[in-house]
Image: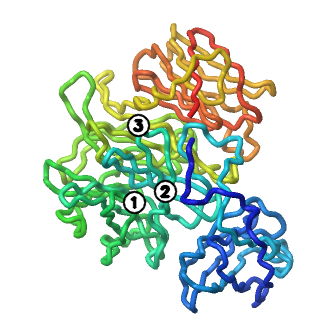
Amino acid sequence: MKRILLTILAVVTAGLAMAQAPLLLGKNHAMKRVGVEDRYLLLPVQEREEYAAIKVLANNQQVQALNVKLAVDHVDYYVPLDIERFGAGELLLDIFFHGDRRFTGAMKDFLCWKEMKQSNTFDTKNREKYRPVYHHTPVYGWMNDPNGMFYKDGVYHLFYQWNPYGSQWENMTWGHSTSRDLIHWTAQPTAIEADALGTIFSGSCVVDKQQDRVVAFYTSAGQSQTQSMAVSKDGGKTFEKFSGNPVLVSTEEDFRDPKVMWNDEVKRWIMVLAVGQEMHFYSSANLKDWKYESAFGKEYGCHDGVWECPDLMKLPVRGTDKQKWMLICNINPGGPFGGSATQYFIGDFDGHKFTCDHKDTRWMDYGKDHYATVTFDNAPEGRRIALAWMSNWQYANQVPTKQYRSANSVPRDLDLFEYNGQTYCGVTPSKELLSLRGKVVKTLPQAGEIVVDLKGSTEITLSNALGEQVVMVYDASKRTFSMDRTRTYASFSEAFPCVTTSPVYGDISQLRIFIDRCSIEAFDAEGRMAMTNLVFPSEPYNNIKVKGGKVTMYQIEN
């Protein structure tokens, strides 16, 4: 996968050590003067330490605040702070360490003072054996929810919750990547950064065709959660925050993740917000002034956790001339196998109120690593293309990578289908994935697509020489599909080993299974079942055994 981040290309060791001693102000408080000689200040990170709160001062004014796990006695990796942009000859770092000095030792002896470096370059070459080959990942740092996805002028834009200053959740910012084919992604400059209203939580973008602009909506996470907007007049490359932010406030504690769309039936913009364990609907004629319309959620679906990351869309029902509305609701915790997951509701929306046709809880994906699912605005051909965050909050901060953490799922097209008088969400691998199919191979590839033509009940086992394995079973009589990852590397979390099981709506004749270095995504080829699970084999699975089906394997080389 091609990964570019501006001019950040060379090696971290090119930096020069900063010899100036810190100014010690107490047991946990220090300052450090930094002469701006190069573009980046490379901050040494030690993940097991507590966060240090850093205020960056230029000319006696605070220009940035961030939290970093500064190294005490070991450096796991470095993160770059762009100091050149502040336009000052010297900066002052005001640092407060939250760690307990009984365990960390004396602050004057911390390794970070020696290991802070300056450099005009930063190494982004992959150093992780589990980094996916063909799934989107951040070049470095932590990533969670996909945000603000839209399509315009032949380009797909993916924004995402990003921590540029570490590989665990913190310092929420909108990272940005672009693609022309949903497969090959190019990293772009940071899109939206924290301000006095708070850090930047999840949200959405809309293509406003009347004014030829892209408008982003996001949650400003400060003392309270409020909704803000920013406008791009260059197709999503850069955004200017609205001077009247916030545009929407509430007394509710959990009030976030605005999803905005144009509703042609009522000729108004609609916003769906996750509010506690409900979804609230608002309408607007100008994207600035919002009117509360209604709430949905009580007595519907799963309520074991907080509702997050909504999406709302009208979808065709296969084989009919009907259309129905679908409301996506991500929840954490409360997933069918613990932690986070994506549920959905089928019904109708009249521009004011959503009504649901069913009382049962329905999951879009029955794996354990499919969350924060949302779709692209303005996608071509009227398609509803979804991406998910491929992880679970139970262990997302602990998975065995450090240069980066987390990937997105493969793109999936959403529609609806009927089965036994009920309407369900169809999830089909996007057609762009067919272009990844390389040569047919006989040996199980690290990155590939496995197509299995079924003859009834089927068992598929992926394994390696260490005895680690993943077993997938289609039970034709019970009409279920399951994936067992209890016999793979999982020492980083007791919540990781699991068997996930999905209902199957009808008979499966073909499975499409996408494997990458740390993930397995299994689909009914007709889009009636989806299951996404991470795996971290100590060495790659190199053997496949299939009982009850015919297998074809395609190498994927991105």
Instruction: Say what secondary structure mark 1 lies in.
Output: loop
| Figure quadrant of the C terminus | top right
Asked if labels 3 and 2 touch by Cβ distance under 8 angstroms, the answer is no
Q: Which mark is residue 237?
A: 1
The residue pinned by badge 2 equals 188
Instruction: Say what secondary structure mark 2 lies in.
Output: loop
Three-letter code, disc 1: Lys
Asked if labels 1 and 2 touch by Cβ distance under 8 angstroms, the answer is yes
The residue pinned by badge 3 equals 362
Instruction: Say what secondary structure mark 3 lies in.
Output: strand
Query: In this figure, what is the number of numbered marks?
Result: 3
Q: Position of residue 291 (x, y in %)?
A: 21, 65
Foreground disc of the pair 1, 3? 1
Residue situated in front as seen by the camera: 208 or 51: 208
Q: First in sequence: mark 2 or mark 1?
A: 2
- Marks 1/3: CA–CA distance: 37 Å
Q: First in sequence: mark 2 or mark 3?
A: 2
Q: Which residue corresponds to the image point at 67% horizontal and 44% vertical from the top-left?
A: 495
Residue situated in front as seen by the camera: 206 or 20: 20
Q: How is the image coloured?
A: rainbow
Q: Is residue 455 above or below residue 83?
A: above
Q: Position of residue 513 (x, y in %)?
A: 54, 25
**Badge 1, how many Cα within 10 Å: few under 14, some, many 20+?**
some
| Figure quadrant of the N terminus | top right
Dividing the picture into quarters, in which one does residue 545 lie? top right
Residue situated in front as seen by the camera: 378 or 438: 438
Q: Is residue 95 above or below residue 12?
A: below
